[in-house]
Image (cartoon, rainbow, N blue to C red):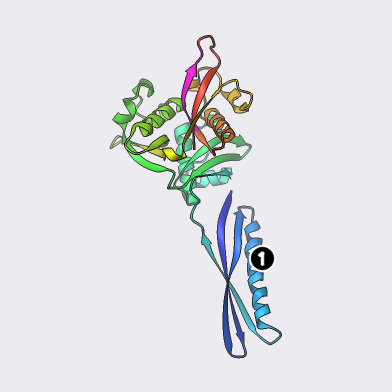
Amino acid sequence: MASKIFAIGVAVVVENEALFVGVFLCMWFDLSWSGEWLFDWCACLRGVMGMSAIRSGLGFAAIFGVLVLFPLPTVAGVTWLDTTGTQRAGSGYPISNRLTTNWAYASRGAEALCAQWGYARGLYTGSQNGDIMGIDCLSSDIAQWFDVPGSQVRMWASWLNGHVAVDNQAYFLASIVAHSICATSPGDYGTGFFTGYQDFENDLVGLVCIPREYVGRFGADTDDPRFPDLANISGDIRGAAWWALRSSSIQICQYRGYQTGVPVYFTPYPNSYTVVNLSVACF
Protein backbone atom coordinates (compact mmCIF):
# COMPACT_ATOMS: atom_id res chain seq x y z
CA MET A 1 0.00 0.00 0.00
CA ALA A 2 1.36 3.38 -0.94
CA SER A 3 0.53 6.69 0.68
CA LYS A 4 1.26 10.16 -0.61
CA ILE A 5 2.81 12.70 1.76
CA PHE A 6 3.87 16.24 1.01
CA ALA A 7 6.97 17.23 2.92
CA ILE A 8 7.81 20.80 3.82
CA GLY A 9 11.24 21.45 5.24
CA VAL A 10 11.88 24.40 7.52
CA ALA A 11 15.45 25.37 8.31
CA VAL A 12 16.46 27.95 10.92
CA VAL A 13 19.98 29.36 10.74
CA VAL A 14 21.48 31.49 13.51
CA GLU A 15 24.52 33.35 12.27
CA ASN A 16 26.27 36.31 13.83
CA GLU A 17 23.22 37.13 15.95
CA ALA A 18 21.05 37.21 12.84
CA LEU A 19 18.20 34.78 12.30
CA PHE A 20 17.45 33.29 8.91
CA VAL A 21 14.46 31.08 8.26
CA GLY A 22 14.14 29.07 5.08
CA VAL A 23 11.18 27.01 3.96
CA PHE A 24 11.88 24.30 1.44
CA LEU A 25 9.34 22.22 -0.43
CA CYS A 26 11.12 18.90 -0.57
CA MET A 27 9.18 16.70 -2.97
CA TRP A 28 6.40 14.18 -3.30
CA PHE A 29 6.97 10.95 -1.47
CA ASP A 30 5.49 7.57 -2.20
CA LEU A 31 5.60 6.09 1.28
CA SER A 32 5.28 2.36 1.81
CA TRP A 33 4.45 0.15 4.75
CA SER A 34 7.88 -1.51 4.48
CA GLY A 35 9.70 1.10 6.55
CA GLU A 36 11.27 2.81 3.55
CA TRP A 37 9.42 5.98 4.48
CA LEU A 38 11.88 6.47 7.36
CA PHE A 39 14.67 6.82 4.85
CA ASP A 40 12.58 9.18 2.70
CA TRP A 41 11.84 11.50 5.58
CA CYS A 42 15.44 11.49 6.73
CA ALA A 43 16.65 12.16 3.20
CA CYS A 44 14.42 15.21 3.00
CA LEU A 45 15.61 16.41 6.38
CA ARG A 46 19.23 16.02 5.28
CA GLY A 47 18.43 18.12 2.22
CA VAL A 48 17.00 20.88 4.38
CA MET A 49 20.01 20.80 6.64
CA GLY A 50 22.35 20.90 3.66
CA MET A 51 20.59 23.94 2.22
CA SER A 52 20.81 25.60 5.60
CA ALA A 53 24.52 24.91 5.73
CA ILE A 54 24.97 26.55 2.33
CA ARG A 55 23.17 29.63 3.61
CA SER A 56 25.37 29.81 6.66
CA GLY A 57 28.54 29.93 4.59
CA LEU A 58 31.84 29.22 6.30
CA GLY A 59 31.01 31.11 9.47
CA PHE A 60 29.82 29.47 12.66
CA ALA A 61 26.11 28.78 12.63
CA ALA A 62 23.58 26.87 14.67
CA ILE A 63 21.35 25.04 12.23
CA PHE A 64 18.04 23.44 13.03
CA GLY A 65 15.92 21.47 10.57
CA VAL A 66 12.26 20.66 10.97
CA LEU A 67 9.98 18.70 8.68
CA VAL A 68 6.26 19.28 8.63
CA LEU A 69 4.40 16.45 6.92
CA PHE A 70 0.93 16.90 5.49
CA PRO A 71 -1.22 14.05 4.18
CA LEU A 72 -2.46 15.07 0.77
CA PRO A 73 -6.13 15.05 -0.15
CA THR A 74 -7.02 11.92 -2.07
CA VAL A 75 -6.93 12.42 -5.81
CA ALA A 76 -10.36 12.14 -7.38
CA GLY A 77 -11.25 8.67 -8.51
CA VAL A 78 -10.22 5.12 -7.69
CA THR A 79 -6.93 4.00 -6.14
CA TRP A 80 -5.83 0.39 -6.28
CA LEU A 81 -3.85 -0.93 -3.29
CA ASP A 82 -2.59 -4.21 -1.91
CA THR A 83 -3.66 -5.31 1.57
CA THR A 84 -2.14 -7.79 3.98
CA GLY A 85 -3.96 -10.11 6.36
CA THR A 86 -2.79 -7.97 9.28
CA GLN A 87 -4.23 -4.83 7.73
CA ARG A 88 -7.51 -6.56 6.97
CA ALA A 89 -7.75 -7.82 10.54
CA GLY A 90 -7.04 -4.31 11.78
CA SER A 91 -10.09 -3.03 9.91
CA GLY A 92 -12.31 -5.16 12.13
CA TYR A 93 -13.17 -7.49 9.26
CA PRO A 94 -10.42 -10.11 9.03
CA ILE A 95 -10.27 -12.02 5.75
CA SER A 96 -7.78 -14.79 5.09
CA ASN A 97 -9.41 -16.54 2.15
CA ARG A 98 -11.63 -14.99 -0.51
CA LEU A 99 -13.16 -18.39 -1.23
CA THR A 100 -14.82 -18.59 2.17
CA THR A 101 -15.81 -14.93 2.49
CA ASN A 102 -19.28 -13.55 1.83
CA TRP A 103 -19.44 -10.60 -0.59
CA ALA A 104 -21.33 -8.37 1.86
CA TYR A 105 -18.83 -9.05 4.64
CA ALA A 106 -15.98 -8.36 2.21
CA SER A 107 -17.65 -5.08 1.19
CA ARG A 108 -17.96 -3.97 4.80
CA GLY A 109 -14.33 -4.81 5.38
CA ALA A 110 -13.16 -2.95 2.28
CA GLU A 111 -15.05 0.17 3.28
CA ALA A 112 -13.65 0.06 6.81
CA LEU A 113 -10.08 -0.42 5.59
CA CYS A 114 -10.27 2.32 2.96
CA ALA A 115 -11.73 4.66 5.59
CA GLN A 116 -8.64 4.08 7.75
CA TRP A 117 -6.53 5.34 4.85
CA GLY A 118 -8.61 8.47 4.30
CA TYR A 119 -10.85 7.29 1.46
CA ALA A 120 -14.63 7.48 1.31
CA ARG A 121 -15.53 3.94 0.20
CA GLY A 122 -13.93 0.76 -1.00
CA LEU A 123 -14.29 -2.63 -2.67
CA TYR A 124 -12.00 -5.62 -2.74
CA THR A 125 -10.86 -6.43 -6.25
CA GLY A 126 -11.43 -10.16 -5.85
CA SER A 127 -7.77 -10.91 -6.57
CA GLN A 128 -5.71 -12.75 -3.97
CA ASN A 129 -2.12 -13.99 -4.01
CA GLY A 130 -1.25 -15.73 -0.76
CA ASP A 131 -1.75 -13.21 2.03
CA ILE A 132 -2.16 -10.28 -0.36
CA MET A 133 -5.59 -9.10 -1.50
CA GLY A 134 -6.24 -6.19 -3.83
CA ILE A 135 -8.57 -3.37 -2.88
CA ASP A 136 -10.04 -0.38 -4.72
CA CYS A 137 -10.47 2.74 -2.58
CA LEU A 138 -12.70 5.56 -3.81
CA SER A 139 -12.55 9.27 -3.10
CA SER A 140 -15.64 11.09 -1.89
CA ASP A 141 -16.28 12.97 -5.14
CA ILE A 142 -16.71 9.78 -7.14
CA ALA A 143 -18.52 7.76 -4.45
CA GLN A 144 -21.88 9.15 -3.31
CA TRP A 145 -23.26 7.23 -0.33
CA PHE A 146 -26.95 6.73 0.49
CA ASP A 147 -29.15 4.73 2.80
CA VAL A 148 -31.98 3.22 0.76
CA PRO A 149 -35.12 1.58 2.16
CA GLY A 150 -35.00 -2.18 2.14
CA SER A 151 -38.42 -2.18 0.48
CA GLN A 152 -36.91 -0.33 -2.48
CA VAL A 153 -34.19 -2.97 -2.74
CA ARG A 154 -36.56 -5.93 -2.54
CA MET A 155 -38.95 -4.56 -5.16
CA TRP A 156 -36.51 -5.39 -7.95
CA ALA A 157 -37.11 -8.74 -9.63
CA SER A 158 -33.38 -9.46 -9.55
CA TRP A 159 -33.43 -9.48 -5.75
CA LEU A 160 -33.74 -13.23 -5.26
CA ASN A 161 -36.58 -14.70 -3.20
CA GLY A 162 -37.24 -11.50 -1.29
CA HIS A 163 -34.24 -12.05 0.98
CA VAL A 164 -34.11 -9.42 3.72
CA ALA A 165 -30.43 -9.79 4.69
CA VAL A 166 -27.92 -8.67 2.09
CA ASP A 167 -25.57 -11.40 3.30
CA ASN A 168 -28.01 -14.00 1.98
CA GLN A 169 -28.19 -12.56 -1.52
CA ALA A 170 -26.11 -13.74 -4.46
CA TYR A 171 -23.48 -11.17 -5.37
CA PHE A 172 -24.35 -10.82 -9.05
CA LEU A 173 -28.02 -10.28 -8.31
CA ALA A 174 -27.21 -7.72 -5.62
CA SER A 175 -24.87 -5.96 -8.05
CA ILE A 176 -27.62 -5.75 -10.68
CA VAL A 177 -30.02 -4.23 -8.16
CA ALA A 178 -27.49 -1.70 -6.86
CA HIS A 179 -26.74 -0.61 -10.42
CA SER A 180 -30.45 -0.39 -11.25
CA ILE A 181 -31.30 1.73 -8.20
CA CYS A 182 -28.49 4.20 -8.87
CA ALA A 183 -29.16 4.42 -12.60
CA THR A 184 -32.86 5.17 -12.06
CA SER A 185 -32.57 7.40 -8.99
CA PRO A 186 -32.75 11.22 -9.03
CA GLY A 187 -29.31 12.54 -9.82
CA ASP A 188 -27.11 11.74 -12.76
CA TYR A 189 -25.65 8.39 -11.68
CA GLY A 190 -24.29 5.71 -13.97
CA THR A 191 -23.93 2.74 -11.63
CA GLY A 192 -23.35 1.78 -8.01
CA PHE A 193 -22.77 -0.95 -5.48
CA PHE A 194 -24.00 -2.00 -2.06
CA THR A 195 -21.66 -1.33 0.86
CA GLY A 196 -22.67 -4.52 2.66
CA TYR A 197 -23.96 -2.52 5.62
CA GLN A 198 -27.56 -2.92 6.70
CA ASP A 199 -29.73 -1.39 9.42
CA PHE A 200 -32.33 -4.04 10.21
CA GLU A 201 -34.16 -1.93 12.79
CA ASN A 202 -34.89 0.84 10.28
CA ASP A 203 -34.80 -1.42 7.21
CA LEU A 204 -32.05 0.50 5.45
CA VAL A 205 -29.32 -0.72 3.12
CA GLY A 206 -26.07 1.13 2.36
CA LEU A 207 -25.57 2.07 -1.28
CA VAL A 208 -22.84 3.91 -3.18
CA CYS A 209 -23.68 5.57 -6.50
CA ILE A 210 -21.11 6.69 -9.07
CA PRO A 211 -21.79 9.87 -11.10
CA ARG A 212 -22.48 9.10 -14.74
CA GLU A 213 -19.57 11.21 -15.96
CA TYR A 214 -17.16 8.63 -14.51
CA VAL A 215 -18.95 5.54 -15.82
CA GLY A 216 -18.61 3.51 -19.02
CA ARG A 217 -20.57 0.39 -20.02
CA PHE A 218 -18.88 -2.52 -21.78
CA GLY A 219 -19.37 -6.22 -22.32
CA ALA A 220 -17.44 -9.40 -22.99
CA ASP A 221 -18.31 -13.02 -23.64
CA THR A 222 -17.36 -15.29 -20.77
CA ASP A 223 -15.07 -17.31 -23.06
CA ASP A 224 -13.09 -14.25 -24.19
CA PRO A 225 -9.39 -15.18 -23.85
CA ARG A 226 -8.40 -11.55 -23.29
CA PHE A 227 -9.84 -11.77 -19.78
CA PRO A 228 -8.49 -14.92 -18.10
CA ASP A 229 -10.38 -14.43 -14.83
CA LEU A 230 -13.63 -15.12 -16.68
CA ALA A 231 -12.56 -18.77 -16.57
CA ASN A 232 -13.28 -18.69 -12.82
CA ILE A 233 -16.98 -18.21 -13.56
CA SER A 234 -18.63 -21.59 -13.79
CA GLY A 235 -22.24 -22.70 -13.94
CA ASP A 236 -25.06 -20.17 -13.72
CA ILE A 237 -23.43 -16.73 -13.73
CA ARG A 238 -26.11 -15.45 -11.35
CA GLY A 239 -24.64 -17.64 -8.63
CA ALA A 240 -20.98 -17.10 -9.50
CA ALA A 241 -18.46 -16.22 -6.79
CA TRP A 242 -18.17 -12.52 -6.01
CA TRP A 243 -14.40 -12.54 -6.35
CA ALA A 244 -14.56 -14.12 -9.81
CA LEU A 245 -17.10 -11.57 -11.03
CA ARG A 246 -15.20 -8.63 -9.52
CA SER A 247 -11.79 -9.60 -10.86
CA SER A 248 -13.27 -10.36 -14.29
CA SER A 249 -15.09 -7.04 -14.37
CA ILE A 250 -11.88 -5.23 -13.49
CA GLN A 251 -9.97 -6.94 -16.30
CA ILE A 252 -12.63 -5.88 -18.80
CA CYS A 253 -12.68 -2.33 -17.45
CA GLN A 254 -8.93 -1.90 -17.38
CA TYR A 255 -8.77 -3.13 -20.96
CA ARG A 256 -11.11 -0.23 -21.75
CA GLY A 257 -9.02 2.30 -19.85
CA TYR A 258 -10.91 2.37 -16.55
CA GLN A 259 -9.61 1.44 -13.10
CA THR A 260 -12.36 -0.83 -11.82
CA GLY A 261 -15.91 -1.96 -12.39
CA VAL A 262 -18.88 -4.06 -11.29
CA PRO A 263 -21.05 -6.60 -13.12
CA VAL A 264 -24.47 -5.20 -13.97
CA TYR A 265 -26.17 -7.52 -16.44
CA PHE A 266 -25.76 -10.58 -18.60
CA THR A 267 -27.16 -11.70 -21.94
CA PRO A 268 -27.49 -15.43 -22.64
CA TYR A 269 -26.99 -16.91 -26.09
CA PRO A 270 -29.84 -19.10 -27.39
CA ASN A 271 -27.59 -21.96 -28.46
CA SER A 272 -25.16 -21.94 -25.55
CA TYR A 273 -25.55 -23.08 -21.95
CA THR A 274 -22.05 -22.15 -20.92
CA VAL A 275 -21.22 -18.82 -22.61
CA VAL A 276 -23.01 -15.54 -21.86
CA ASN A 277 -22.18 -11.92 -22.51
CA LEU A 278 -21.22 -10.20 -19.25
CA SER A 279 -22.04 -6.49 -19.08
CA VAL A 280 -20.00 -4.36 -16.68
CA ALA A 281 -20.10 -0.76 -15.51
CA CYS A 282 -16.61 0.71 -15.36
CA PHE A 283 -15.36 3.70 -13.38
Residue 7 in picture, x, y percent from top left: 57, 64
- Write the residue at 39% across / 28% down: 177
In the image, is residue 251 above or below residue 266?
Answer: below
In the image, is residue 121 above or below residue 243?
Answer: below
In the image, is residue 249 above or below residue 55?
Answer: above
Q: Which residues are magenta?
A: 262-269
Residue 240 in picture, x, y percent from top left: 51, 23
> Residue under circle 1?
43
- Write the residue at 59% across / 51% down: 2
In the image, is residue 158 above or below residue 192?
Answer: above
Q: Does the image show residue 120? A: yes
Which residue is farthest bottom?
17
Q: Quadrant of residue 63?
A: bottom right
Closer to the camera, 9 or 190?
190
Q: Residues within 10 Å of mark 1 (few under 14, many from 20)?
A: few
Closer to the camera, 182 or 175?
182
Dominant SS of magenta comes to strand
Q: Is residue 54 left or right of residue 164?
A: right
The reply to whether the magenta stretch includes residue 96 is no
Residue 160 in picture, x, y percent from top left: 38, 22
